[in-house]
Image (cartoon, rainbow, N blue to C red):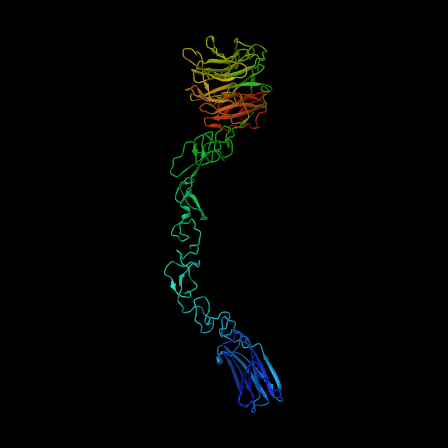
Amino acid sequence: MRQSAILLLPLLLLACKKDSKEPDTKQAAVHVKIGHHPKFSQGCIRVEAHGGAGEPALVEFKEPQFDSNDPVLNVAVFRKADWARDVEITVRVFENGCRAEQLVDERKRTFSFASAGRQEWLLEDLHTADEDGDGFVPPGGPMNRGTDCDDLREAAFPGAPELCNGRDDNCDGQMETGVVNKAWYLDGDRDGFGLNGPGTEACDPPSELYVEVDGDCNDARADIHPNIVEKCNGSDDNCDGRDDELFTEGPGALGTACTEFCNGTYACNDAQTGTVCTGTPPTPLYADADSDGEGEKESAPEGELCPGAPMPPMMADNTRDCDDADPSTNTQATEVCDGLDNDCDGQVDEEMSCGSLKKVDGDPVLAGGNWRTVAVHPSGYPVWVAGLDGKLAVKMNATSTFISHGGDTTTRCGPAGNTLDWHAAWVNPNNSYLVVVGEDGWIGEHNVGSCDHTQINIPGTSDYFSGVVGVGNPAQVFAVSTVGHLYEFTGATERHDSSGRYWGLHALGNDALYAVGSTGESSPLTPVVNLYIRNTTWGTPAAHNLQGTTGYNGGLRAVWAADSTLIYAVGDRGLVVKGDGQSRDWERVLSPSGAAINYVSVAAPPGTKNAYIIGNEDSVGRLQRLTPYGWAKAPAFATGEPIVQLRDIAVTSTSNFWIVGDDGHVYHFPEP
């Protein structure tokens, strides 16, 4: 323990060793114990005693008087002869010397020496902190003084050399001033990378916009720097000297051709994470089966068209057509009286008051008749209907009712009271006479006033005439039978034999007859189309080839020659075939319905190639319409499809046709 004494003798202060003899207890003295930081070795501690008018006593402790192993100074203060009774003792602490400006702590205390005796003053909390032993203490103590700005670093103190280390080494409140050993780069976009270049040499950055790392190739954008992931955007994002290098090879590489667009090439996508096909969007194309410039409503695209390319055949760039199998039905067409929505406005025969397709009611002659055939003069009247049990009736004009010429009338065809089943009829356009044929070879020609009838001996049992037609003027009449014979009624009846069975007959001009039916008389049946040509005589028929019917079991029931380029034949289980007058090869047309409809009759309005086809699905009658472009919409029955079987249709135009069936059902369009 280091000791010192302030005496009352001329020798004022005496420092002594730790083992010095303590003052006589009879004398007045103050023992001052001054604690200091173990590393407080370069500072100064001054003890001053003052007793009034006399000279003060002073002692200083400086390096190397401090002992880190015993950080306590012992000072003995003795009263001087010229002091007053009370003595003021002041202890001052200085950092790094004893200059007044280096004062960091000061303590004062007054002691009374009225009587002898030992007194003690213990100072353990003097501000002598110097953890780094550099001679300077940090601010603190009662005076809050001290100049060390970092008491954990010996190299940091006032006057220390400033180092380029990002710290305040000389405690002037600034860092790294005046020391040059770093290069700084302008980082204008604040992305952590400065512009390439020589940089600015300085220890401290010239401003907050400077960093120590360069390599930025675009200092105006924070999303461009060496650490960024390259994007697809036409820029060098990662500053490697290449643009979009991740997207220039392999499938979908930038700039390569693609097919999703017209003149398409791969370009960067909006997210800049890959490529996408870009170009001029193609115009979607839709099937235009009837080539009227409009595609079917609500249909799906079936192609695309690029600008400048020609429109492919049978395609359209719209879906306005409400019936793509009928070229006379589209948004540019004119509405006519035909039971169809010709102009695709969602209405049928609007503002025309032409009536609808419905049953002829209120005519007692028609009631209960199982009508098998209907024949109409090309002018529209008369209209003849014939059926089972001798039923035969005529309507002469639009305002008249049907008149019966059945087997129980005097104007009948056949013997008195007959119940002959009539199966086919034809109206001679030259004189409006009716030719009706049917059961057991009966044939009659009716002029409304009377009927000239006869019976032809048809070989076979329960066979009958199934079709009749006339050609020329005067008319030459032909009929076919269910035993496959063609009968020619000229001056004398002539029969042309063939195998199989006939169910339908129609003429193409004056020199060609088409007879349809089936081979054989029992299942399996093969459909047949035979063509008779007038040379000197009608001769032997030529059998036509029906493609797509291999394995089919059934027969054809009706035929109609629309013109020399289009002939329709229909039959059992949805069979429809079409041909022309120039070829023996016929094409099969698949039925539009999933159900197997048994077709029984077909007719085409004059001047058109549209076939109106009658058939039955079980006991429900159907009307369908087939054009050269496919299955088109047909006029709808006003009260829904008949719940009886239909048998025949006769058409004079799209604005006038008749349909007959079982149980008195006779339909007309247009019927008011």
Q: Could you tell me residue 398's position as x and y percent?
A: 52, 23
* Residue drawn where x is 40% and y is 61% of the image: 185
Q: Position of residue 228 (x, y in %)?
A: 44, 53
**Quadrant for the C terminus in the image:** top right
For residue 366, above or below residue 226:
above
Asked where in the image residue 143 lies, by quadrant, the reply is: bottom right
Looking at the rendered image, the quarter that the N terminus falls into is bottom right
Is the residue 220 above or below the residue 416 in the image?
below
Outermost residue toward the bottom in this view: 82
Q: Does residue 280 sit above or below 442 in this rendering? A: below
Q: Is residue 383 visible?
A: no
Please state the horizontal and vertical placement of residue 6, each as a whole percent of the image: 55, 86
656 or 155: nearer the viewer: 155
Coordinates of residue 234 in the picture (x, y in percent): 40, 49
Q: Decide if residue 282 is on the left or right side of residue 441.
A: left
Q: Nearer the viewer, residue 302 or 195?
A: 195
Q: Is residue 665 above or below residue 156?
A: above
Q: Residue 286, can we see it?
A: yes
